[in-house]
Amino acid sequence: MSVMIGDKAARLLAVLYSAAVGGLPGMNNACRLAEEYLSRPGPLSDNVDALIRNTALKCGGVGFVTSLGGLMTLPVALPASLAGTMVLQMRMVLAIAHIG
């Protein structure tokens, strides 16, 4: 039983990672995001801090929007919130790695 759960989790993480690397409609991929922050004026460390702050705000927005349905939509909203947040955070980490 635990092997099946592990396989499903690994497949889910692979899909989320693929979305972070390749991007989604309306969302740049990690390399384009990194290039966007690299092209900004100012110290590189300030640009990376801005990337982290902006990603944190977006993750908070995902959590807010998915919680609007309340208890009735919780079985759908919770996995959607987790998946959305994971994609945004994976993309952020990949962009920081690309910048570095």
Image: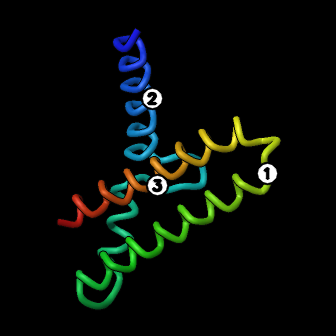
Establish if 84 lies above or below 41: above
Which secondary structure, mark 2? Answer: helix
Q: Who's the residue at 33% across and 56% down the image?
A: 31
Whole-percent x, y for residue 21 in the image: 37, 45
Q: Amino acid at mark 1?
A: Gly
Mark 2–mark 1 Cα distance, whole angstroms, equals 25 Å
Q: Amino acid at mark 2?
A: Leu
Towards the viewer: 35 or 100? 100
Which secondary structure, mark 3? Answer: helix
Q: Is residue 9 left or right of residue 69?
A: left
Residue at image mark 1: 70
Whole-percent x, y for residue 33 in the image: 39, 63
Q: Do labels 1 and 3 touch, CB within 8 Å?
A: no
Which secondary structure, mark 1? Answer: helix
The disc at residue 12 is 2
Mark 1–mark 3 Cα distance, whole angstroms, equals 23 Å
Which quadrant: the C terminus? Answer: bottom left
Whole-percent x, y for residue 99 in the image: 23, 66
Towards the viewer: 66 or 58? 66
Residue at image mark 3: 88
Whole-percent x, y for residue 19 in the image: 46, 41
Residue 5 position by quadrant: top left
Q: Who's the residue at 46% across and 55% down the image?
A: 88
Q: Who's the residue at 23% across and 59% down the image?
A: 98
Mark 2–mark 3 Cα distance, whole angstroms, equals 15 Å
**Residue at the farthest left position:** 100
Q: Residues within 10 Å of mark 1 (few under 14, many from 20)?
A: few
Q: Residues within 10 Å of mark 2 (few under 14, many from 20)?
A: few
